[in-house]
Image: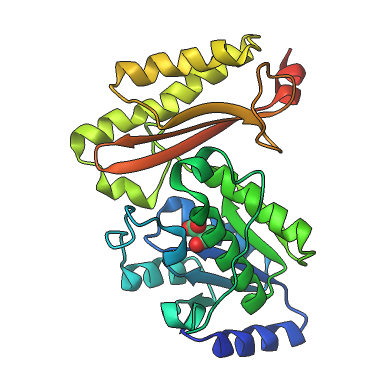
Amino acid sequence: MRILRTIAEVRLAVGAARREGGSVGLVPTMGAFHEGHLSLMRRAREQNDLVVVSLFVNPTQFGANEDLGAYPRDEARDARLAEAEGVDILFAPAASEIYPDGFATNIHVAGVTDVLDGASRGPHHFDGVATVVTKLFGIVRPDVAYFGQKDAQQVLVVRRVVRDLDLDVRIDACPIVREPDGLAMSSRNVYLDADARARATALNRALDAAASAFEEGERDADSILSAAHRVLADAGIAPEYLELRDAETLQPVARVEADALLAVAAHVGAARLIDNHLLSVLRTRDAS
Ligand code: PAF
């Protein structure tokens, strides 16, 4: 595996693979790898001739009061893990390589960014994500880019950028990877002390409770959400948001008649965590 720092080096390496007719997979990351990231790398490895992983803690997607300074960083460990997954190139640029002096472009996706994490964290968050991901697509020009479904809203934002700007890349959203007790894997789980770690399992249990109500035939959004609220309240967690929204448009839903995203964000101890379940109307119909 090669660790590359500059855009020019990545272009050269990817260009050489392309000239030989190879397909290119990109896994954009901010490092602090866990099994979720590794599952994306494995999928990219299975499906492509060249696998590029970007490791860049993107400052523009963090708010002033967020954890940019504290965000876990261990490039040597990440490099070992990526290499063990057969990654070809780890692109780990300095901030000045991505945002040189005079950088003045911002990609803003309207609509799907106004709610959930966009509302909680502010518009800069998805602007930062959309802008850096578009840059990475321009640098690597991947055939496929792999994202985790845990950041379901991020996936919708990236898909919208790709559609609206006619970018020639397929977005592959990969399943959420969970700890044995159901907690969704996240780089931010390292912030949890023992008490918060135990309470954090309530997020997935709350989503499970709501999903069970849905699977048993409940369609009223408030009733479905009540089941989740009860589990969170029992764990002493006040969610930043707990919402049911249309899975494609993120419009609010009063009744679940089409696929819906059940999404939660909450501060648990020192960590802000997010999680989600997809409520699939088709899957429920098939099962009945
Ligand atoms: O999901 C992440 O780790 C980041 O938001 C991403 C996609 C790498 C952009 O910085």
Q: Is residue 78 above or below residue 138?
A: above
Where is residue 14? Give x, y as percent.
Answer: 65, 83
Q: Residue at x 49, y 54 (%)?
A: 125
Residue 174 is left or right of residue 234, and the answer is right
Residue under the image location 72 percent in, 68 percent down: 143
Residue 62: % across, % down = 41, 58
Q: Nearer the viewer, residue 217 or 103?
A: 103
239 left or right, relative to 89 = left
Q: 224 or 48, which is in the foreground?
A: 224
Q: How many numbered tags mark residues here?
A: 0
The front one of 273 and 193 is: 273
The answer to whether one can see residue 155 in this image is yes
Residue reaching furthest left? 194
Q: Quadrant of residue 93?
A: bottom left
* Relative height, residue 12 to residue 169 (above, below): below
Residue depicted at 40% across the width and 13% down the height: 230
Q: How is the image coloured?
A: rainbow
Q: Quadrant of residue 269?
A: top left
Q: Is residue 188 left or right of residue 102?
A: left
Going 58% across and 44% down the picture, which residue do you hit? Answer: 153
Q: Is residue 114 above or below residue 135?
A: above
Could you tell me residue 266's position as x and y percent?
A: 38, 34
Q: Position of residue 81 (x, y in %)?
A: 40, 66
In this orientation, does residue 38 appear?
no
Q: If the image is split into quadrants, where does the C terminus sit?
A: top right
